[in-house]
Image (cartoon, rainbow, N blue to C red):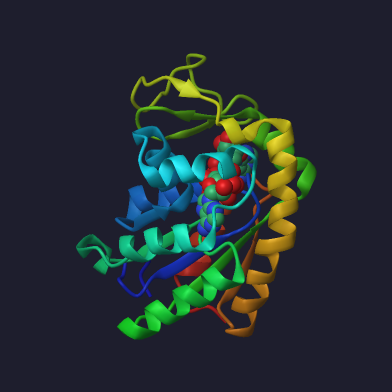
Amino acid sequence: MTVGSPTLRAVFLGPPGAGKGTQAQRLAKEHRVLHVSTGDMLRQEVAGGSDLGRRAKGFMDAGQLVPDEVITAMLLARIQAPDASRAWILDGFPRTLPQAHSLDRSLQAEGIELSHAVDFEVPSDVLVQRLSGRRTCARCGSIWNVHSKPPRQPGKCDACGGELTQRADDRPDAVSKRLQVYAAQTAPVLDHYRAKEILVEIDADRPPEVVYENLMEVIAKPAG
Ligand code: AP5
């Protein structure tokens, strides 16, 4: 399987700060793969002040999951859009078993099969350190880190010159809640994909370029 072929239909799993967004952005840029991030979609809704955004904001700021019915409708509509006929990766979805089952049903109805469920594994103490240092470009969405990937000029994006901001849910109390929520609600999703024999695990506690090389290897061949 070539990496950009339309048969690449992958979900990226793993705790907050594991590097899903960092890897997905690079893959999308280098291989014309559609990157669908439910977190980014929700943050756009919040910024735009939509009803959905107003409903989601309280959950997100508190480090909790947005209700399944809200997020699932938004995600399924996105992957039915015309530009989703090419290869895609879902970053941050599914996060609960009901979301995974909804995705299964929707793909089955369209005759599409998920090719890979990639689990990015990182120890909790490393996640907390990464999230405390994360900065995101308000203009282009590029991800930086004051500890491990600082921009040349503090507070400015190297890619577009936009202002770098800290996410509201990267405060220590929200981070700790997100890690608890991950263990309770998202970890069972791994077993769902393990049973389908499409789960691949990547040690993501290594430099981003090494993780990316490993990711390229695993998605270039069928999972299982
Ligand atoms: P979302 O935006 O999806 O957040 P998340 O899953 O918590 O993941 P993060 O974006 O925090 O981390 P990441 O793994 O992408 O790491 P990144 O690459 O940025 O969701 C936010 C909220 O939206 C949720 O809490 C929930 O409320 C709601 N939501 C979203 N989807 C939902 C769903 N399906 N159901 C219900 N609610 C939903 O990297 C982190 C930092 O580490 C960066 O600074 C980066 O530079 C650095 N870094 C990355 N890789 C490395 C590396 N290898 N070495 C060193 N540093 C690294």
Q: Nearer the viewer, residue 87 or 80?
A: 80
Q: Residue at x 31, y 70 (%)?
A: 5
Q: Residue at x 38, y 44 (%)?
A: 51
Looking at the image, in which quadrant does ligand 1 appear?
top right
Q: Nearer the viewer, residue 120 or 4?
A: 120
Residue that extends furthest to the top in the rendered view of this protein: 153
Q: Is residue 181 visible in this depiction of the protein?
A: yes
In the rendered view, does 157 fall on the left or right side of 183? left
Which quarter of the image is occupied by the N terminus? bottom left
Q: Residue at x 63, y 44 (%)?
A: 17
Q: Nearer the viewer, residue 82 or 12?
A: 82
Relative image position of residue 182 (x, y in whole percent): 69, 56
Relative image position of residue 74 (x, y in whole percent): 38, 58
- In this picture, is 100 found above or below 47? below
Q: Nearer the viewer, residue 5 or 72?
A: 72
In the rendered view, does 85 fall on the left or right side of 209? left
Q: How many marks?
A: 0
Relative image position of residue 189 (x, y in whole percent): 63, 70
Q: Residue at x 34, y 35 (%)?
A: 48
Which quarter of the image is occupied by the C terminus? bottom right
Residue that extends furthest to the left in the rendered view of this protein: 82
- In this picture, is 156 found above or below 175? above
In the rendered view, does 48 fall on the left or right side of 13? left
Q: Is residue 22 visible in this depiction of the protein?
A: no
Relative image position of residue 58 (x, y in whole percent): 56, 40
